[in-house]
């Protein structure tokens, strides 16, 4: 049980303090942790950026962020004022390392005030090209502390390919120990994602079925209605593979595919996840042709409003080859999963925002019911809906009430809304608390990040070296390119479009 009582005094340094991530996610998360009694008794939050702000002005700026983006709505005046008393600002210009002196002085003030137990958390909420410079300055100014006194949180993307990820890992591990490094993947902090482990390993009925004998395929689908918005500049250098599949979707796949850990230790769990990545079949050029699909959206209408195509978004090349959609068929070649395809897809400007994992079980070995009874026959499915609906549905066959024997699929539903009164915390609340308590379970270890890059590198290279002649190939507000339907249809399946509209 995590409580404020256990937490050491903490100095939270946020690089990119005036940036979008702090406004939208970090500041609201820290405020909500405070409001719910999960911040340490002694803490200081120091925002940094190149801008010149007073502490007061910075407090006002982030209050606007919290008011606009917190899951709990506008701040409560009294809570905010006591929270904000511990919020400070110090200008730091990463391109002028001398400015770290001011930061060092400020950190030392709080270290002296809070005592020797104090831990410092550096949160790098900045553009990835600044990660190495900041880490180097932290080292140069002797701010890297020890495993007990210092942690660094690195946002994604962690590298832009295997080589750059390795370089970054090398640099970081030359300054910090692995125990000090928290590579964040916010999907792992989502309530429903954490529940996958609970559902799989705290219940005995699933494990005997969780394998190639009973499961015929798995789908992991993260679809987004939004386009790239004002992130075109970043997205041009990323694309769906780097932005979503290398991290979020592969992590979901690992949670479904992993073997049972022997305990709940961070490294034990991460070992089991790495095993999945290591068992994944490497892509041959032929696999890339037949098992991967890329897409890019063109203009369309979303909720009555015309939206631009990707190539017309701000910061995007008019002839861009960047994919805004990707669908891939993966294989996990081990005893549990050999022969079970894992279909993964993600994209922007799709018809619906929904993240779901669907596990389709094999059909009954022998059909005893006559044809008329089984008109609406559907193989059993387990649907884990991560968002927006938070639920787990087991789809089974049931008898429709009436004098005749007619079967149809019915859902056994565990729905968060109907089951729990309390609202779920935001992923960032969970993850920031984990950082403060020193729990790395939901963070990426160096080898996890590298294995994920290694797996995807052949696809990335192939897509980059060969321009897609079909781009743009799907309309905004559609379900993506037709080839993505064909990819799964070739094996006799189709993408499930839950949670709201049953197909
Ligand atoms: C981020 C990606 O990591 O995740 C974004 O960079 C994406 O492009 C976002 O929109 C999706 O996160 P969520 O929590 O809204 O599903």
Image (spheres, rainbow, N blue to C red):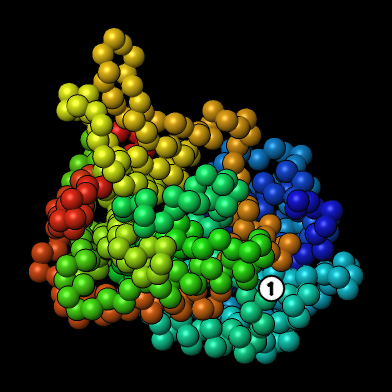
Question: What residue sits right under mark 1 in the picture?
Answer: 151
Q: x%, y% of residue 366?
A: 26, 39
Residue 14 horizontal side relative to residue 293, left or right? right
Above or below, 77 relative to 468:
above
Does residue 333 appear anywhere in the picture? yes
Q: Quadrant of residue 92?
A: bottom right
Say whether mark 1 is within 8 Å of ligand 1.
no
- Count of numbered labels shown in the rendering: 1
Q: x%, y% of residue 94?
A: 57, 80
Above or below, 132 relative to 263:
below
Above or below, 441 relative to 423:
below
Please state which of residues 400 and 177 is positioned toward the viewer in this rendering: 400
What's the residue at 87%, 66% (across, down)?
A: 114
Please state which of residues 104 and 172 is positioned toward the viewer in this rendering: 172
What's the residue at 27%, 18% (across, down)?
A: 405
Please state which of residues 238 and 304 is positioned toward the viewer in this rendering: 238
Q: x%, y% of residue 65?
A: 57, 50
Q: Which secondary structure, mark 1?
A: strand
Q: Quadrant of the C terminus?
A: top left
Residue 239 horizontal side relative to residue 420, left or right? left
């Amino acid at each position: 049980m995590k409580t404020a009582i256990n937490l050491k005094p903490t100095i939270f340094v946020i690089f990119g303090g005036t940036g979008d991530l702090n406004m939208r996610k970090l500041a609201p998360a820290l405020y909500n942790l405070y409001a719910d009694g999960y911040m340490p008794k002694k803490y200081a939050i120091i925002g940094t950026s190149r801008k010149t702000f007073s502490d007061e002005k910075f407090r006002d700026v982030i209050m606007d962020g919290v008011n606009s983006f917190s899951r709990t709505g506008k701040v409560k005046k009294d809570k905010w004022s006591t929270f904000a008393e511990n919020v400070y600002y110090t200008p730091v210009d990463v391109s002028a390392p001398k400015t770290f002196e001011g930061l060092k002085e400020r950190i030392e003030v709080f270290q002296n005030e809070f005592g020797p137990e104090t831990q410092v958390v550096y949160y790098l909420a900045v553009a990835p090209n600044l990660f190495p410079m900041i880490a180097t300055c932290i080292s140069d100014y002797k701010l890297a502390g020890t495993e007990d006194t210092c942690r660094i949180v690195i946002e994604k993307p962690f590298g832009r390919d295997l080589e750059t990820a390795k370089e970054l890992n090398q640099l970081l591990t030359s300054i910090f120990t692995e125990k000090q490094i928290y590579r964040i993947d916010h999907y792992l902090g989502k309530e429903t994602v954490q529940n996958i482990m609970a559902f799989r390993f705290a219940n005995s009925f699933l494990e005997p079925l969780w394998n190639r004998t009973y499961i015929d395929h798995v789908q992991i689908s993260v679809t987004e209605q939004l386009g790239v918005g004002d992130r075109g500049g970043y997205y041009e250098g990323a694309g769906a593979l780097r932005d979503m599949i290398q991290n979020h979707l592969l992590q979901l796949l690992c949670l479904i595919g992993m073997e049972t850990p022997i305990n709940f230790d961070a490294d034990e769990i991460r070992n089991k996840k790495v095993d999945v990545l290591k068992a994944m079949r490497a892509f041959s050029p032929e696999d890339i042709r037949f098992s991967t699909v890329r897409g890019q959206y063109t203009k369309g209408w979303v909720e009555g409003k015309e939206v631009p195509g990707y190539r017309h978004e701000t910061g995007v090349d008019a002839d861009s080859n960047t994919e805004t959609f990707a669908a891939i068929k993966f294989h996990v070649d081990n005893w549990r999963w050999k022969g079970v395809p894992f279909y993964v897809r993600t994209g922007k400007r799709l018809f619906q925002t929904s993240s779901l994992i669907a596990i389709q079980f094999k059909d009954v070995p022998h059909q005893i019911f006559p044809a008329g009874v089984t008109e609406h026959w559907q193989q059993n499915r387990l649907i884990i809906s991560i968002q927006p609906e938070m639920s787990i549905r087991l789809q089974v066959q049931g008898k429709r009430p009436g004098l005749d024997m007619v079967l149809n699929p019915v859902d056994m539903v565990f729905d968060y809304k109907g089951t729990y009164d309390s609202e779920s915390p935001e992923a960032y609340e969970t993850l920031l608390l984990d950082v403060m308590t020193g729990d790395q379970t939901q963070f990426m270890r160096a080898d996890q990040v590298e294995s994920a890059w290694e797996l995807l590198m052949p696809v990335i290279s192939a897509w980059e070296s060969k321009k897609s002649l079909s781009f743009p190939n799907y309309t905004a507000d559609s379900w993506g390119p037709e080839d993505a339907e064909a990819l799964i249809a070739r094996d006799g399946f189709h993408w499930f479009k839950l949670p709201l509209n049953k197909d």
